[in-house]
Image (cartoon, rainbow, N blue to C red):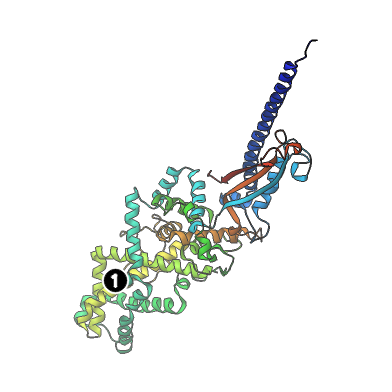
Amino acid sequence: MKTLRGQISVFLALSAVLIFALLCTVLEAGRCACLDYMAGQAAASAVESVFAAFHGDLLDRYGLLACHGADHGTEDWIKTAASYAEKYLAPGAGTAYDASDRLGLFDLSVKEEKTVYITEGNGRIFAGEVLTFMKSAGLSILIQEAFSRLGLYSEEDGLSLLQTLQELGSSEDSSLESILGNFEELKEQVASLAAEGGDEEPGGEGGEAGGSPGQAGEGFSADILEQLKAVRENGLIALVTGSAELSDFSWRDPLLPSALPAAEKAKNADYAEAGFSLGEKLLLGEYLLHRMNCYTDEEQAGSRYEIEYVITGKNSDKAALEAIAARLLLIRVGFNFAYLLTDAEKLAEAEAAAVLIMSIVALPELTAVLKWILVTAWALAESIADIRCLLKGEKIPLWKNKTDWKLAALSMDSEQASGSGRGISYEDYLRLLFYLGSGEEEMYRMMDVIQARLRLWDGEFLMRDHMVCAELSLTAAMAYLYIQHPAFGSLIEAPESRKYTKKAAYGYGRR
């Protein structure tokens, strides 16, 4: 009797099991690779879709890319990103909505890893966005244009000029109160002169020395008193603007970016670049002058003196303009006084007037002191005339010569003075003042201006709610389908699912 061994059948059965296991492993590996790829794509697509909804007006009006991130703890960007991820991983009905699919996806979660808002980084994140925009316009061209407007030829010239302006603005002797305080003694002497010798004819050596300058000296002294009285009682701004109607806009708003707590401003400080080079300050200045308005620009709704506010930080338009006028006065007095020291003819006129006045009051020992007081007063009156011209849109050179000097023969009548037709304008002086300021504070004030302007059209707009960079992590779990089955659950000690975690980040101009 022949025995049936069945080796082939057993071999085929065992081979079929191995082949089936291999096929299931390959299929499972394909599912895993598919989900791994799709999870990465979903994470990247989700964060990029969030940033695709950038603020249109912010881009159109100010050239900045930023998208809405959160509304003070309510609906935020990570929830929006999670909804995008669910749609990307589950097209159609979708696995996230309990529909059947071949991936077997479940337990999808999206978590926020980092969010960088435009108001963070101590102002340098905002500055980075501005510089990215400005560099797209041609870095070398913009820097060269800024230099040429100021009459400079190199970065060394620019640094030298800024150092000179810093010295003029920081010196205690150059403060407005110090300048005006120097004339207290002169006021007393002139008042005494008017009371005691007003009806007398100048005579003696003083009259001979004075000649025609003596008449100019008397008128000059009276004009000094008028100038000082106007500045002290009405303020400098009334003296240089006259009857012009000034803006009454106020910057008292607790929602402004500059009012943010210091801790919130300092977030993500390591993300931003440290400090500003002169070239970067030049670009930021060009952005400020081209995107914001100042006193000499056409009137419009809202703040009219935005650049003045950025530079000074005063809480009203009028206060900001007055602070700018005071700074310009200090600069102009310094340069005008320096010019007078080089003009022997004008020094002789001042000395002749001093001799005349001191001979009348019988105090010849004070002639030298009075001479320099008169020279400083002449520089002050010329400077006030300069500011009037600048606010009219005319140009004034930094360094003057005989042709550029307006007030001749010790005259204080600066009402009819006009610009020289050459030099730099009011906007260019604002450039110089901007370069001297604190970078961090100016950046937040620029954000104040942008927010205030956009809130005229969108009352809910807040700079603090808009982000420029973000990172998320997406976690998705997939149940095993081909290599584990409930029938073998007790035989195979393996997890019931496999998890994938993918991170994705996006930033405007950065990756």
Q: How many discs appear? A: 1
**In-front residue for pair 435/333:** 435
Q: Residue furthest top?
A: 1
- Locate residue 334: give its quadrant: bottom left
Is residue 365 visible in the rendered structure shown here?
yes
Q: At which x and y percent is residue 227?
A: 40, 76
Q: Residue furthest bottom?
A: 196
Q: Is residue 53 above or below residue 301?
A: above
Q: At which x and y percent is residue 364?
A: 20, 82
Give the residue displayed 53% in from the left and 54% down from the top.
Answer: 291
**In-front residue for pair 92/341:** 92
Quadrant placement of the N terminus: top right
**In-front residue for pair 128/474:** 474
Is residue 212 visible in the rendered structure shown here?
no
In this picture, residue 81 sits left or right of residue 219: right
Q: At which x and y percent is residue 12?
A: 73, 19
Q: Residues within 10 Å of mark 1 (few under 14, many from 20)?
A: many
Mark 1 element type: helix
Give the residue displayed 39% in from the left and 49% down from the top.
Answer: 147
Residue that carries the numbered disc 1 in the rendered image: 375
Give the residue displayed 59% in from the left and 49% down from the top.
Answer: 59
In this picture, residue 110 sits left or right of residue 435: right
Q: Is residue 310 above or below residue 77?
A: below
Q: At which x and y percent is residue 308?
A: 49, 63
- Locate residue 395: give its quadrant: bottom left
Q: Is residue 497 above or below residue 394?
A: above
Give amino acid for label 1.
Val
